[in-house]
Image: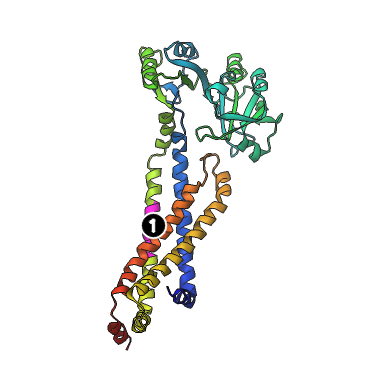
């Protein structure tokens, strides 16, 4: 294969080559970013445990359930354990420093979420102090929190009556390898919140946001969910019991048409870049019309003419694809930090990088086939006469 002809043609039109490679690199970078956002949105759903159910109000997630529902749920056949989860909704110093916080049953969190592994501190310290908290490794890195650090949180849903911030002391730093528990969450003792509300030290609704329960091994979660819903059909508040995957999917559906919009943008970018590269290769074919005729007159086969155009397209697109996926990988941590509060699971995976590069090569194949096919069919006499 006359690689020298391919290299010389690319060098002869440096600006066109660089612009095509650059535009493809930007397109691949954008496609990798969009795919990562979509994958991150679904990550919690995909990583959800099959043995966990979520019990929430049938009216709305923002309607709290009574405390006394917990022992009743525990009494349902097939339920292994129930843990309270109460969304706290505070912020650290400034409203922009917002991250997830949950009040939980400290003695049940470890069994309920075994994917939460402590890197520092102890479960015992977390369980024995009302103001103790666990924080994810992401919060530790972002704000510099360490074991023993005091974290003041300003309540919005549950403000303290005297206007002072809530105070929590870091008793442990955890890391979760599962996307359904992000590493930017603070967990604290639900009793601390409940006692503060009942004593008048804080204001806000008294109740439980959701109950998370583990199903006993070998028990059908669907049957357990139906039994729990039936148990509270008569009130005082009806409940809706869902799998953890379905609960996570609710948050994705809250975004409405955002996933479809992202897919549409990606499709538009892909269509535009295919046309741009095709135009480049057609222009290259027209400019080399006579050259191809001379090649065939000198004895080069039709297959060589076909290969020169096709490989040139693959080289251009492969270079653009490589630059694009490299840029997406190098900027992954920056984007992850910037979007940690919106998409805590944002992470460019190896499959995304591979699909980005593979897509670039597919574009090269699609854009190169038509001009290469024209070069294959081009008659030597026709090319030489057209030049004259």
Identify the residue shown where x is 44% and y is 63%: 317
Quadrant the N terminus occupies: bottom left
Identify the residue shown where x is 28% and y is 74%: 377
Identify the residue shown where x is 58% and y is 20%: 190
Q: Is residue 205 magenta?
A: no
Q: Quadrant of residue 369?
A: bottom left
Q: Relative to 364, say whether 261 is above or below.
A: above
Residue under label 1, please give it: 270
Q: Relative to 370, say whether 68 is above or below.
A: above
Considering depth in this image, is 310 or 267 the residue closer to the camera?
310
Tell me where residue 323 appears, x and y as whole percent.
Answer: 52, 60
Tell me where residue 297 appears, x and y as whole percent.
Answer: 34, 84
Considering depth in this image, is 31 or 117 the residue closer to the camera?
117
Q: Quadrant of residue 240?
A: top left
Q: What range of the chain is rendered magenta?
A: 265-276
Q: Relative to 44, say whether 28 is above or below.
A: below
Quadrant the C terminus occupies: bottom left
Left or right relative to 85: residue 162:
right
Considering depth in this image, is 335 or 114 the residue closer to the camera?
114
Tell me where residue 128 appears, x and y as whole percent.
Answer: 66, 18
Mark 1, secondary structure of its residue: helix
- Which residue is farthest right? 148
The chief SS type of the magenta part is helix
The answer to whether residue 238 shows anywhere in this view is no
Tell me where residue 204 appears, x and y as whole percent.
Answer: 54, 21
**Label 1 Cα crowd, 10 Å radius (few <14 / some 14-19 / many 20+):** many
Left or right relative to 153: residue 325:
left
The answer to whether residue 40 shows anywhere in this view is yes
Identify the residue shown where x is 42% and y is 12%: 76
Left or right relative to 133: residue 319:
left
């Amino acid at each position: 294969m006359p690689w020298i002809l391919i290299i010389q043609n690319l060098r002869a039109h440096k600006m066109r080559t660089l612009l095509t490679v650059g535009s493809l690199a930007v397109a691949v970078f954008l496609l990798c970013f969009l795919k990562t956002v979509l994958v991150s949105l679904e990550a919690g759903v995909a990583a959800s445990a099959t043995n966990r159910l979520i019990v929430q109000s049938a009216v709305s997630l923002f309607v709290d359930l009574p405390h006394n529902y917990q022992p009743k749920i525990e009494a349902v056949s097939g339920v292994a354990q129930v843990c309270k989860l109460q969304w706290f909704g505070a912020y650290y110093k400034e409203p922009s420093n917002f991250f997830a916080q949950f009040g939980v049953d400290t003695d049940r969190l470890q069994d309920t979420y075994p994917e939460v592994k402590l890197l520092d501190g102890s479960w015992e310290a977390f369980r024995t102090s009302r103001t103790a908290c666990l924080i994810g490794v992401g919060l530790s890195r972002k704000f510099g929190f360490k074991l023993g650090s005091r974290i003041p949180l300003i309540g919005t849903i549950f403000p303290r009556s005297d206007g002072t911030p809530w105070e929590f002391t870091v008793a442990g730093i955890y890391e979760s390898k599962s996307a359904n528990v992000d590493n930017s969450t603070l967990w604290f003792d639900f009793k601390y919140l409940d006692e503060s509300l009942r004593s008048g030290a804080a204001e806000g609704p008294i109740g439980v946001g959701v109950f998370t329960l583990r199903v006993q091994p070998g028990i059908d979660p669907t049957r357990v969910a139906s039994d729990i819903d039936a148990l509270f059909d008569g009130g005082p508040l009806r409940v809706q019991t869902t799998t953890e995957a379905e609960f996570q999917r609710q948050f994705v559906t809250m975004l409405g048409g955002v996933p479809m919009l992202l897919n549409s943008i990606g499709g538009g970018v892909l269509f535009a870049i295919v046309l741009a590269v095709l135009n480049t290769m057609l222009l290259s074919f027209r400019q080399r019309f006579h050259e191809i005729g001379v090649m065939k007159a000198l004895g080069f086969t039709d297959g060589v003419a076909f290969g020169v155009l096709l490989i040139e397209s693959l080289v251009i697109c492969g270079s653009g694809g490589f630059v694009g996926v490299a840029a997406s990988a190098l900027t992954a941590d920056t984007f992850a930090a910037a979007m940690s509060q919106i998409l805590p699971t944002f992470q460019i995976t190896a499959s995304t990088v591979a699909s980005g590069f593979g897509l670039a090569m597919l574009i090269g194949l699609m854009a190169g086939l038509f001009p290469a096919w024209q070069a294959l069919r081009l008659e030597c006499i026709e090319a030489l006469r057209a030049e004259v």
